[in-house]
Amino acid sequence: MLKYSIKRIILAFVTTFIILTLTFFLIKSLGPAKIASSKPAEIYSFYETQVEYGYVVKFETMHPELGDFLAKYEPPGTSKAIYYYERPIVDQYFEWLGNIVTKFDWGRSTHIEPEASAIRIIAERLPVSLKINIISVVISVPLGIGLGILAGLKKNTWVDHTISTSVMVFISIPSFVIIIFLLWGLAYNGNLPTKWPTADKSTGVKALGYIIPVLSLSFGSICGYTRFVRAELCEVMSSEYLLLARTKGLTKRQAIMRHALRNAFVPILPSILAEFIGVFSGSMILEKIYNINGIGDLYITSLSAGNAADRDLNVLMVDMAIFTIVGLLAGVILDLSYGFIDPRIRMGEKNS
């Protein structure tokens, strides 16, 4: 088990490295980062930072063989000029990688918060996204499992049909559509905030701000848990070993509690972790719609490819690294958790 775990973790980091490398080249191929400002001092500061990180080179004379220069800066009181040229993408990549490996420096923001550390920007916004997603999971797990158990125990009754029909309806509606209906019904025609409360709002208003995004994320998760739990429980309820338990004298309640639920929960518990990752990554659009200052909104903002001045490569790469590492490590934990929940799976791994 230990050897297998180490292999999976190493593979996860190798996969992360490949994904980030491809992302770097794809974003850089869209064109060099630029600054929207026309003020000479800001232009100078921006491109000097690019030179510092190895993305740009500067000369005091023009070099046509390097292509068109990105910017020209004339220091006040002098007749000289500084010309900034983009370095080859491969060279930029190795500079970027070297800064991370040697100094763990992911660069500074070029658009969202100019000159601010990309890591600091992510660290400030990550807690908001985590809180929303954790609250959503805390709400959806017990409700989804409870409704799934109820539907499974009441199979083919009006209770089962009602729950199953509701699940089919809500699971087919994307969360960003649900949040629009919630905004219309609970915010614009209700008393809830129409957008994410700012830091200067009262604690009560901030608490109310969680309701709409949490509900919009929870609907899909509740439906997913309900359908999965019902399917697993119905399969276990019709198994031969449960019938054998009944013939040995156990009541229906005892057979369900001791055998049916226990065996049905073997694949259910690991799925909770997978569901959290799905919700975590799926909250990007919701954060954008509800103006939540989380890393999902940050990801979309930093990827504004319509204008080179709006792209923020360094922030985007840190954001991408967070989502990729969390997703891959969650997959590792998900696989390993089966062995801890069911000893039979762990023994099977040893015998292989």
Image (cartoon, rainbow, N blue to C red):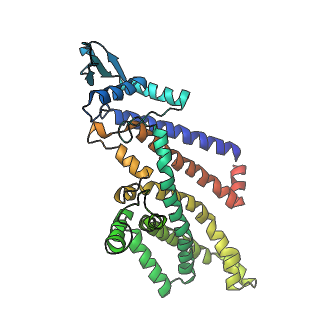
* Residue 238 appears in view: no
Q: Residue at x 69, y 74 (%)?
A: 259
Residue 244, x across and y down, in percent: 71, 79
Q: Position of residue 346 (x, y in %)?
A: 70, 55
Q: In the image shown, does 225 or 50 lie closer to the viewer? A: 50
The count of marks equals 0
Observer-nearest residue: 116 or 132? 116
Could one spot residue 269 in this view of the protein?
yes
Relative vertical location of residue 256 with respect to residue 335 in this rendering, above or below = below
Up-down: is 50 above or below 36?
above
272, 294: nearer the viewer? 294
Residue at the image point whose x is 55% and y is 66% from the top: 138
Tell me if 266 is positioned left or right of 324 in this view: right
Q: Answer above or below: position of 266 versus 326.
A: below
In the displayed structure image, the side of residue 116 where residue 73 appears, left or right: left
In this view, the residue farthest toward the right is 248
Q: Position of residue 302 (x, y in %)?
A: 36, 43
Residue 83 lies in quadrant:
top left
Question: Residue 180, percent across and down?
Answer: 33, 67
Taking depth in this image into account, of 244 and 164 the one nearest to the observer is 164
Image point 58% across, 74% down: which residue?
233
> Residue 76 is drawn in which quadrant?
top left
The outermost residue toward the front is 77
Q: Relative to residue 33, is residue 104 drawn left or right?
A: right
